[in-house]
Image (cartoon, rainbow, N blue to C red):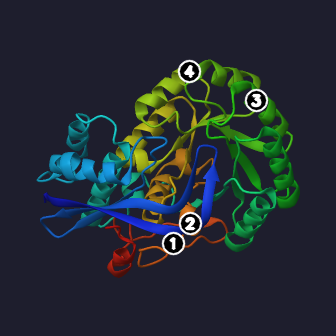
Amino acid sequence: MKIRSIEAIPFRIPLKKATEWARGRQEAAEHVLVKLYTDEGVVGIAEAPPRPTIYGESIASIKFAIDEWLGPMVTGSDPFETEKMWDRFDSIAGNTTAKASIDIAVHDIQGKVLGTPCYKMLGSWTDKIQMAWCVNLNPLEGMVAEAQEMIRVYGFKTIKLKVGVAPDRDVEMVRAMRKELGDDIVLYVDANQGYDPFTALSALRRMADYGIILAEEPCPILDKKGRKMIAERLDMPLSGDESCVTPADVAREIELDCLRVVNIKTARTGFTLSEKIVHLCEQSQIKNLLGFQGDAGLGSLASAHFCAAHKNTSQYYASEASFFLWLLDDFLKEPIAVKDGWLELPHGPGLGVEIDERKLREFAMS
């Protein structure tokens, strides 16, 4: 079997309402659908969500990288030769999301050929995962109402709160969330590098009074000394996201010894590099959390497969791969269901989903 061709299709699916965080805003999932075609008729699919403020990629750059650079590197190759594929990819700097999407699509092909779901092929720790919901920045009443609705409708037991803009307001929001949601809900915060180190330390100490279990990227990732100071003085584990884009980044963060949790996003590391990150973290007794990139259903499900495959990603923290619930619609034939806060993985081969081509045409961007 050989990869015959590759297609990158930009699409746009509006959100139910805009989401905001310390470093950005999003009104729609404007991403790229990647399709890998083989000479035996097996098609692998994946989703590439650009994040220009973090990785410097856009819809246009992802499509260009796949059409002009990465696609030709894999065309004519065996879809099982992932090591050779990544060796070729290393000749092109950056373009993490474009590379990751091809890696996931290749694994989708492998699962379909073997007749095995990706989560089983990658490790098969479990076949269902607990889900978390992320509440983005909004007026306080709206944030509380959103959390209450997602708990009531979908049964979420873990809520992630975006902070990092106004520390006093953030602390008040955390206090209100704990009061309104009760002590049985797990809460943690993500500042998206929005605080300076001293503000972060002060604000997080106050938030700790309300049972926050961890804090993600409290200050700029380039301020290594500031992050070290926070880690040493705060009785709460720090989680890395923007500081942990590649396995090499994670290795450096382990050496710096600030983080006890590393956020993995398969949209930027695929399955191959994500596994390398899991193994690095396991050896250092660092836990993993499966994050999200504002993915639609396809990308969310890919993250869920990887999460379910490994103990270190599914045993300790709920997965954030729930953003698809924020979309007005999707192009998957069968919608993904979250029940009582859990997502059960599809048992079909590969990613276990099919695309509704009619809907895809509706969302495709010219």
Q: Which residue is at a point 70% across and 67% down the rendered structure image? A: 150
Disc assigned to residue 343: 2
Percent across and percent down for residue 33 are 34, 62
Label 2 and label 1: CA atoms lie apart by 8 Å
Going by the numbered disc 4, the residue's amino acid type is Leu
Going by the numbered disc 1, the residue's amino acid type is Ile
Label 2 and label 3: CA atoms lie apart by 37 Å
Q: Which residue is at a point 83% across and 40% down the rendered structure image? A: 168
Q: Nearer the viewer, mark 2 or mark 3?
A: 3
Going by the numbered disc 3, the residue's amino acid type is Thr
Q: Judging from the image, what secondary structure is the residue with disc 2 in?
A: strand
User: Tags 3 and 1 in contact by the CB under 8 Å rule?
Assistant: no
Q: Judging from the image, what secondary structure is the residue with disc 3 in?
A: helix
Looking at the image, the residue that sits furthest to the top is 225
135 and 36: which is toward the camera = 135
Label 3 and label 1: CA atoms lie apart by 40 Å
First of labels 4, 1 by sequence position? 4
The residue tagged 1 is 336
Tell me the crowding category of disc 1: few under 14, some 14 to 19, or many 20 or more residues within 10 angstroms, Cα based: many
First of labels 2, 3 by sequence position? 3
First of labels 4, 3 by sequence position? 3
Percent across and percent down for residue 223 are 59, 23
330 sits left or right of 156 in the view: left
First of labels 2, 4 by sequence position? 4
Tell me the crowding category of disc 4: few under 14, some 14 to 19, or many 20 or more residues within 10 angstroms, Cα based: few
Disc assigned to residue 322: none
User: Tags 4 and 3 in contact by the CB under 8 Å rule?
Assistant: no
The residue tagged 3 is 199
Q: Which residue is at a point 80% across and 56% down the rendered structure image? A: 140
User: Tags 2 and 1 in contact by the CB under 8 Å rule?
Assistant: yes
Q: Quadrant of the N terminus?
A: bottom left
Label 4 and label 3: CA atoms lie apart by 21 Å
